[in-house]
Image: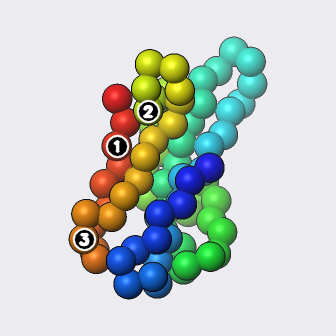
Amino acid sequence: MARSTSPDGAIDAVVVESNSGATTSFSHDVCLAPHGASCTAASSLVQLYRATRSDQAYGVNVRWANASLIKVEYL
């Protein structure tokens, strides 16, 4: 769903979105992977359920605060 590359270009913070069906909400997993590589919910560092980026959109934003710290932002 989203990918943010570390300042040195070596690592990506990756957001993986999943939904288990019509009666459930979205969940978002954030994992770290080598730049350009994929990852799965099983390798996540954090899992968020029903997180929203705005009043009208589910999701989370990831950004690098510095070379070794990522911020996961949501409402």
Q: Earlier in the sequence, mark 3 or mark 1?
A: 3
What residue is drawn where x is 53% and y is 73%? 33
Specify the quadrant of the image occupied by residue 27: top right
CB atoms of marks 3 and 1 within 8 Å? no
Q: Position of residue 36 (x, y in %)?
A: 62, 76
Specify the quadrant of the image occupied by residue 66: bottom left
Q: Earlier in the sequence, mark 1 or mark 2?
A: 2
Q: Which mark is residue 5?
A: none
Compared to 28, does 7 lie above or below? below
CB atoms of marks 1 and 2 within 8 Å? yes
Q: Position of residue 11 (x, y in %)?
A: 47, 77
Q: Is residue 44 left or right of residue 19?
A: left
Q: Amino acid at mark 1?
A: Glu
Compared to 64, does 36 lie above or below? below
Q: Is residue 52 left or right of residue 38?
A: left
Question: What is the secondary structure assignment of the residue under circle 3?
Answer: strand
Q: Which mark is residue 66?
A: 3
- Report, in whole angstroms, how far the alpha carbon at label 3 lies from the one at label 1: 15 Å
Specify the quadrant of the image occupied by residue 6: bottom left
What residue is drawn where x is 47% and y is 63%? 4
Q: Earlier in the sequence, mark 3 or mark 2?
A: 2
Write down the residue under mark 1.
73
Q: How many marks?
A: 3
Q: Amino acid at mark 3?
A: Asn
Choose between 67 and 29: the one closer to the eye: 67
Write down the residue under mark 2.
53
Q: Residues within 10 Å of mark 3 (few under 14, many from 20)?
A: few
